Amino acid sequence: MKNLIRSLALASIGLSSILYGDPLHPEPLFKIERSKNANIIQYDAQVGSDGRLDATEPVVAYWVRLAEQGQMQELSWLQKEFAFGFDADYDPANDSVAIEMAVDIGRSIMVVPDGDRYRARTTIDGSQAYLKKIYIKARKRNFLIKVFYIDLFGEDSNNGQERYERFVP
């Protein structure tokens, strides 16, 4: 599954590299899974041939339609603005990005270099951790969406232990 997502992301970004001459490659950061279906929203860092984040669009998000045929799809404007989009503030001095998610996960996310790759770091259960997955348990009623809880999964950035936190927004 992870290889499928990576291949699809590489194909998508590889096409833009050919069209625009911009040699970017994606590095998976984290994903959002939802109780609604198997489709996920994947978040990737965009890294240039120099090994640094792309200053124009350092992080991208897109659907991976696992409930269908695994195809990638852009987020709609509404999804970007009110659910799965984000604001990214790139810091060239530290080659990092501060992310504020449109969906309220109760904390900010930093995309930071970690050795030879980039990782999404946030607070999980009171510790700094590398975010792997967000799971949202919600139900749609008419035009309203009721979020029951949000689970955060990651790895402690100091000792590598698994981290987990559930909160009710």
Image (cartoon, grey):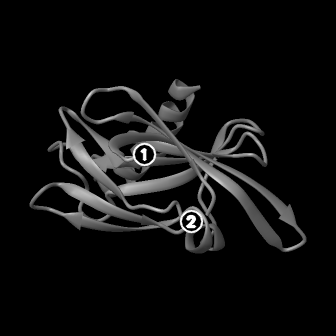
Q: Which amino acid does label 1 sit on?
A: Ile
The disc placed on residue 1 is none
Most extreme residue toward the left is: 93
Q: In which quarter of the image is residue 140?
A: bottom right
Seen from the viewer's position, the closer of residues 50 and 118 is 118
| Image location of residue 149, percent across then percent down | 67, 53
Q: Mark 1 points at which residue?
A: 124
Q: Mark 2 points at which residue?
A: 103
> Residue at (24%, 33%) from the top-left corner?
158
Residue 143: tell me if it is visible.
Answer: yes
From this view, report whether residue 102 is shown above or below residue 160.
below
From this view, report whether residue 116 is shown above or below residue 83.
above
Distance between the Cα atoms at labels 1 and 2? 17 Å
Most extreme residue toward the right is: 142
Q: In the picture, which quadrant includes the C terminus? A: bottom right
Q: What residue type is labelled 2?
A: Val
